[in-house]
Amino acid sequence: MIIQADGSALHVRQDGPENGRAILFINSLGTDLRVWDRLLPHLPKGLRLVRYDKRGHGLSGLGPAGAGLSIETLADDAIAICEALKLEDVTLVGLSIGGLIAQAVALKRPDLARAMVLMDTAMRIGTAEMWGERIAALEAGGIAAISDAVLARWFAPEFLASSEAAMWRAMLERTPLEGYIACCRALAGADYTGRAAEVKCPVLALCGALDGSTPPDLVRATAEAYGAPFHLIDNAGHLPPVEQPEAVADLLSAFLKDTDEGGGRYAAGMRVRRSVLGDAHVDRAEAAKTKLDDAFQTLITESAWGTVWASDAISRRERSMLTLALLAATGNFDEIPMHIRATARTGASRQDVVEAFQHVAIYAGVPRANHALKLAKAAFAEMEENDDD
């Protein structure tokens, strides 16, 4: 399928049930979505597997960004795909530049990121000077001029000597030159060093033991910054899903299990609660807990957030509207401001809120709807004032 994002037509493929846990795969420099082909058959059944050709690669256009392409723009593409497909609680799996894109998505939209797998990547890859030298070589001789060196970093010697390596050479050399160079420039300007604390989702880091592009020590340091587990993939270079798909699948499957219901309904509920209400609100609530209400808070986190709000049966936008309508209809006005503020993360618009309260007016009474609207107006005004600050 094709999804439009900021002037670029992105080639997207989706496998698995639409109600399955969403996994978004983000490919590396010089590859397209086929880099995941060998991995997918080894993953658990029932997952919603989404992969795509990043901008300027495969069948995806470069669009108007051109030479000014940034990791932020590439992250916006990933977010546009999630929104177009109505993906929520997404596990981001990023390989090389895809890992930088995944980190940018997790920073920009923490409500989308349920978990993140950083594969053969880092918070910063290379230097501006290194990427400048590569761009100069590309402009002088095209991708074929650098393909031998790239393939030597991509693969272990045994795989590189096999007949299979020819297919990956063809993929690399057929990558649109303009798109490859644009992504090199994006990599030259990308640096998320020091921002690990801002990422709230669980992280797993993997690296091919023979990776010549992002060496194991670099990926290990990234894992340490995130406080994440780190695993080496034996007999693999920069593209472990190609050389060692079963080993990668085993690690990814275990991570998915650990983060499925968060290793428990409470952890899953806490993730959803934070993504809907925001870290500041949840941190205040957690700090205010006492022995008197600790069990109650656990019950709410597990039942409301870990069960009802965690369900994929309806979108968070729809659930937000339903919650506001029920609160107003039953006269539980105290929580309406909190859920109005949450609309900034659930995607419910102000018109959605109006529609919800109009239904309350017809089916539950005008006074309740009127009071709910007054509370909504005050909450939206407060949100606007904070934005101005």
Image (cartoon, rainbow, N blue to C red):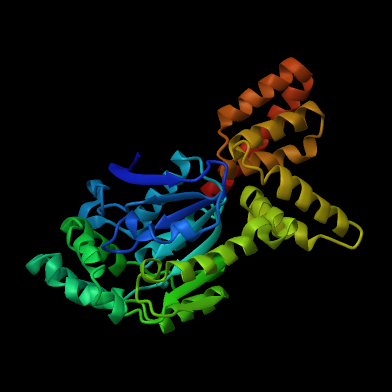
Q: Residue at x 38, y 73 (%)?
A: 124
Q: Residue furthest front?
A: 163
Query: With 245 as the anchor, is 303 left or right in this view?
Result: right
Q: Residue furthest bottom?
A: 217
In the rendered image, the quadrant that contains the N terminus is: top left
Q: Residue at x 69, y 20 (%)?
A: 359
Using the image, determine if residue 65 lies above or below residue 370: below
Where residue 183 sits, quadrant-wise, is bottom left
Give how far across and how far down residue 300 sits, in percent: 80, 49
Using the image, determine if residue 314 lies above or below residue 178: above
Give how far across and how far down residue 280 sits, in percent: 66, 57
Count all numbered tags in the image, as a single digit: 0
Using the image, determine if residue 274 lies above or below residue 385: below
Residue 107 in sight here = no
Give how far across and how far down residue 219 sits, in percent: 44, 77
Where residue 326 sits, quadrant-wise, is top right
Q: Residue furthest top?
A: 362
Q: Residue at x 25, y 78 (%)?
A: 152
Query: With 380 as the anchor, is 205 left or right in this view?
Result: left
Give how far across and how far down residue 112 sits, in percent: 53, 51
Residue 89 in sight here = yes
Q: Residue at x 28, y 44 (%)?
A: 8
Q: Residue furthest right?
A: 292
Q: Nearer the viewer, residue 88 or 127?
A: 88
